[in-house]
Amino acid sequence: MTEVHGKRIAVFVPAAELQQVSLQFGRSEHRPLVSISIGIVFALVGLCGLIYLILAPAGYRFESGMIAMGLIGGSLIHDATKQRFFLEVSAKKAVSRLVFSKHAQLKDIQALCHQAKAAFGYEINESL
């Protein structure tokens, strides 16, 4: 099983290592507290950069870099809190989450799960 972004494989779980697959809806981040904590630190750096830019607009290069870090932090916080459909794949060594697009509909995902069961014999539990 793989998760693909564009033409690049993001997560790959070999079929021989699969133990259990379940369809879930929720936060797809593996460690949301870590991502949110790092995002808050980056967002605070960006906020400081914005304040410095307002107080002393002459040195904009350093502050613009800090603001860019703040935008990255906001993105980390957003990604850690958004809700999506995902397949939680338990393998011998680890648990992976294969995330569906935000545009994916439940009926289409369920149809895909039925096709995977028919073609490959995967039993996918629905924990919705």
Image: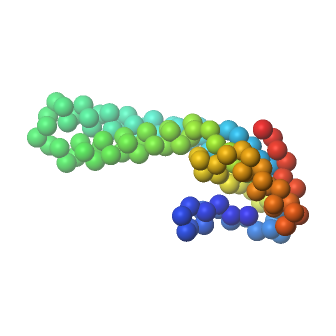
As drawn, the residue found furthest toward the left would be: 58
Q: Is residue 22 left or right of residue 56?
A: right
Q: How many marks?
A: 0
Position of residue 88 measured from the top left corner of the image (x, y, whole percent): 75, 50
Observer-nearest residue: 20 or 111?
Answer: 111
33 up-or-down from 122: above or below: above
Q: Is the N terminus in the top left, top right, bottom left or bottom right quadrant?
A: bottom right
Residue pictured at 71% horizontal, 40% vertical: 25
- The picture quadrant where one finds residue 32 is top right
- The picture quadrant where one finds residue 34 is top right
- The picture quadrant where one finds residue 69 is top left
Question: Is there any visible trace of residue 92 in the rendered image?
Answer: no
Residue pictured at 26% horizontal, 35% vertical: 50
Question: Is there any visible trace of residue 96 in the rendered image?
Answer: yes
Position of residue 114 measured from the top left corner of the image (x, y, whole percent): 83, 56
Residue pictured at 49% horizontal, 43% vertical: 76
Position of residue 125 measured from the top left corner of the image (x, y, whole percent): 85, 48
Residue pictured at 50% horizontal, 38% vertical: 77
Position of residue 20 measured from the top left corner of the image (x, y, whole percent): 84, 54
